[in-house]
Each structure stands twice: as structure tokens, then as C-alpha cells.
Image (cartoon, helix red, strand yellow):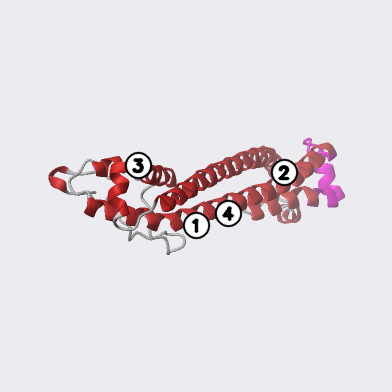
Amino acid sequence: MENPENKNPKSGKSPRNQYVSAEQLIAKMKVAFTNAKQPEIFAGLATVGITETQLDSYLTEITNLEQLNQRQIQEYGEQYAATDIFNQKKEAINATYTRHRNLAKIIFKGDRQANTTLGIDDGRKQAYAAWYQQVNNFYSQILANPDFKTKAASVNIDDAAISAQQTALQEVSSLKESQKKEFGEAQKATDIRDAALDSLYPKYTQLVAFAKVLFPDDQTLEKLGIIVKRKGNLL
């Protein structure tokens, strides 16, 4: 059941029903404003001050909303694509790092300095920033210590392998920034669309409220997209 008292969980100020998707609500409002212009319906609405100019302006807002909604969907698609690319790169780096770390555990077994410096004894980090520092430290410390470097090379953790990982780390850092940028743009597109939706929604609910009084138990309500229950109870 539609409840105009529901609040937007994000802003706390939206009067619209948060259980109905933006796409559904835009479609419902478009039907109502479009069919409200039908002569037999408009004649009744005109008695309570609804004008054709108002309905035309509402439909213009609907067109704008449809465009804003398409932009929001596009932005989220780009965000998801950026996230997928980032995750794939991170997983590839992590797979190689895991293998190198396990080899390092073997060749540096009992070497407290190596285990501490390379972070071999530390738990695996999950959060991106901590993970990045852990992986970057592992390779940087090997390069900085000739003894570490010699032992690591014996199990093919050589200059080429380390360089490849460090280059990949630079790439994943850039991908993370792109992901954050896309997230921000998607959120901004959502905020803009929701603001436009919240602006138009009260005009829609007013029209619906008038219609329920003007056209009781009438199929006219269904033309406006208002569902009529049996015995005249309205959703």
C-alpha cells in the first residue's frame, strides 16, 4: 500500500514511498499526468484548479526524470564495470603474492628478521589500503636487502617478477581511484534524480487525492493508475 509518509532512509526528508522503485514511480506518475488530460477526466480536475498548463509542466518534469534516471543507470553501469576491472587486477596480484609469500615462508623459515621485515608472520590483510601496503612492503623489502633478494631469486622471485608486481600495484592503485570516481558520479546522479523525483511527487499525490474525491468508485481512477479494491477501497 502506498504510504506517502515513508521517509527516504538516506536523506530522512523524502515524502515518497521508498518501497516503490524510481522507475515504477516515474511510470505511475507519467500515466496519471498523461491520462489526466483526457477530456472526461480533465473536466473534473479543472473544478479543483488543475490546469492543462500544470499537467504539461508535470509531463515536462517526467521527461526530465526519465533522462535523469537513464543517466543514473548509466553511471552505475560504469561504476560496476570499473569495480569489476579493479577486482580482477587485485585478484591477479594477490594470487601471485600468495604464491610468493608461501615460497618465502619456506626459504626464510627460522629467519626472524626476514619474517618480520617482509611481514610473513603477519595476518593477511583484507581491507584494500592495508592489503596494498602489505603487498608493496613485501616486494620493496626484498629489493632493499641483498640477502633477501638473493634467497628470493632462488625460488624465482627475481627482479622481473618483482617489477611485474610493482607495476601491477601501480595499475591497481589507478584503478582504485577510477572506481572511487565512478562511485561518486553514480551517487551524484542518484541524488540529482531523487531530488527531482521528490520535487514532483507531491504534485502527483495531490492529483491522486483530488481524483479519489472527484471520481469515487469509478473506473476513471484506474485510468490514472490508481488501483481500486473491491467494495470501493482504494490502495
- State whether residue 89 is above or below residue 215: above
- 43 or 131, which is in the foreground? 43
172 magenta-colored: no
x%, y% of residue 37? 36, 44
Frontmost of labels 2 and 1 is 1
Q: Earlier in the sequence, mark 2 or mark 3?
A: 3
Residue linked to disc 1: 195
Give me the disc on residue 104: 2
Residue range (magenta) = 141-159
Q: Secondary structure at mark 2?
A: helix
* Residue 114 % position (x, y): 75, 52
Seen in the image, is 76 located left or right of residue 215? right
Give the Cα distance between marks 2 and 1: 55 Å
* Mark 4 residue crowding within 10 angstroms, few (<14) / some (14–19) / many (20+): some
| Residue 128 spot, x, y in % from top left | 63, 51
Q: Amino acid at mark 2?
A: Ala
Q: Are marks 2 and 4 in contact (CB under 8 Å)?
A: no
Q: Residue at x 22, y 54 (%)?
A: 213
Q: Main secondary structure of the magenta part?
A: helix
Q: Which residue is depicted at the point 66% across and 55% down? A: 129
Task: Determine whether, in the image, residue 117 is placed left or right of residue 219.
Answer: right
- Name the kind of residue labelled 4 in the image: Lys
| Distance (Cα) linking label 2 and label 4 | 45 Å
Q: Residue at x 45, y 58 (%)?
A: 199
